[in-house]
Amino acid sequence: MKRKFIYICFSMALISCQKLDLNPLSQGSSETWNSDADEIIMSLNDLYREALWKKDADEWTDDWINRDGLTDITNATINGQTSFVNTNWSDTYKAIARANTVLESMDRASGVLSESQINMYKGEARFVRACMYSYLLSHFKNVVYTDKTLTIEEAMQIGQMNPDELLKKIYEDFDFAIANMRESFSSNELKRATKGAAMAMKARIALYMGDYTTAKTAAKACMDLGLYKLHTDFANLFLSRTKQSQESIFAFPRSIALGVAVGGRQSYVSRNAGGWAQFDPSWDLLFSFLCKDGLPIDESPLFDPKDPFLNRDPRCTATIVPFGSEHLDYVYNPHPLALKTKKVSTGQEVNNNDNRAVATYASFNGLVWKKGVDSDWLLNSWRIEPDNIIVRYADVLLMYAEAKIELNEIDASVLDAINEVRARAYKVDKSAAGYPKVTTTAQADLRRILRTERRMEFAFEGLRYMDIIRWKLAEKVLNKPNYGLLDPGDLVAKVVNTGKWFTPTAPTIDDDGIADIAPFYAQGLVKQIAVRKFDANKQYIWPIPSTEVLTSGLKQNPNY
């Protein structure tokens, strides 16, 4: 019997490669496994390991600042040896290989399970495979496709598939999943992927690849299921105590007790509360939020440069901690003359460690994250357990709207989809007053509104990176500095004492919703913290890992 790759990646690194007669007695033999429902479910559960489901990092975008640090993407140094390039490629192919193994063995249960039951389980495995290939296609473009386990000889002969052909294969898997997967699970069942998840993820890859007709159709099908709705409170949705919201179409539960949690949260938390305030929102993000009249800050009379959080879309203060507000038991105030601040629970004045005049490594731009952050972050050794949301209903609504806008099929349903998301932020119904309802039907205006809406809605959720990639904005927004506060002495002399705290005026916002902060730098009022770089000649797709090029004969992507 030929040895087979049970789990493969195309660098020929064997994740599990044993002769079939060497299975330990405590494990199921691959010759007989998946012969009943329990065994199939166990195999399917293995496909939901969180490490296999990759999310893009916010630090690769213009929403982020990490002191004066840059990444391989924001420094334009990404190459075939970059760690996350290799890890994400390898882990994604592991998941594909496991899905293929499950699919090949599932017919062993044909004498025990009905054809519809087997197809339901096959649909789930094909959903996972489609999601994994979607990730590879959207990031690497020119990748290897296989829908079966391979011998070493077979694996060595496979080349890269044409991206258009791969997209067809992905659609076939999603369509099979949609036709055969369950719509929902009962409250006492382990919740896995559903028909709605397949529709939503199909819409996402279609949108990423510019197939707006398919994106529109898939998103609308998900909406028409009637199973999902927006969570009532935007800010509450991302907290650890919010479990299995009806907005979450596909999400992984976490549990500190069961050892499935997110750690190392100090970098996101203010220094007074015991964190490091190292990973913070950028000024680019702060200035992108609209005012409550629906206008950008350079057009709205409501914007106050001395209080940049006043009169803003509610998602601004739900995402970034407003100055002078209570946060994690302290009043947050990065003003350089605020050397003391209040500890709320005791009423005592304490050293203001979120002020760079007190603590040198306080947030370099005065901002810290609020989205999803609450007192739970300070417990359990900085481990937290919010649901890991892969796709939620707000994304489906905005994907539908975007696809229709790009197709120039603008009708009431487009406005309804955008307004439903926006109205939720204001805690009103989309048909009510009390929020800046979108009414324009001009394509260019709606495109700009939609893109700003996505940025306000999905900050800190790992979606901004692929947005700036597919909109071809990365070369614009990542080839500019990350700005921050002057050193304390200069900040007081040049900004505070001249009445220019926090900014002298609103920065100009261009047609892409991007703030121009450079004039403030030219006036000596802000500091360049780091200069981001992006090479448009190559970085819109990632390099193929160098080991794959050298050992498997794959062709490297252009200009790497």
Image: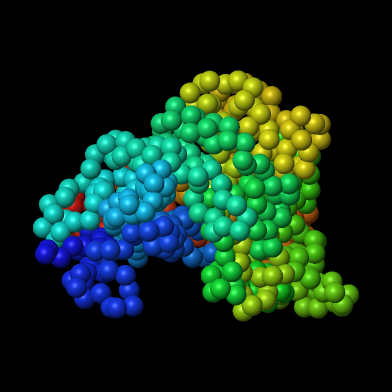
Across and down, in percent, residue 474 comes to 45, 45
352 or 379, nearer to the observer: 379
Across and down, in percent, residue 47 comes to 40, 59
Classify residue 359 as left or right of residue 554. right
Spot the residue most to the right: 347
Q: What residue sits 18% from the left and 62% below the top?
A: 4
Across and down, in percent, residue 531 comes to 47, 57
Q: What residue sits 27% from the left and 53% below the top?
A: 104
Classify residue 364 as left or right of residue 8. right
Query: Which quarter of the figure is the N terminus placed in?
Result: bottom left
Quadrant assignment, res 385: bottom right
Across and down, in percent, residue 382 comes to 61, 75
Q: What residue sits 71% from the left and 65% below the top?
A: 374
545 or 342, nearer to the observer: 545
Can you see residue 61?
no
Can you see residue 260?
yes
Q: What residue sits 43% from the left and 61% below the top?
A: 38
**Is residue 413 shown above or below 284?**
above
Quadrant assignment, res 220: top right
Classify residue 490 as left or right of residue 480. right
Spot the residue most to the front: 111
**Is residue 449 shown above or below 188?**
above
**Is residue 74 shown above or below 195?**
below
Classify residue 149 as left or right of residue 538. left
39 or 16, nearer to the observer: 39
528 or 185, nearer to the observer: 185
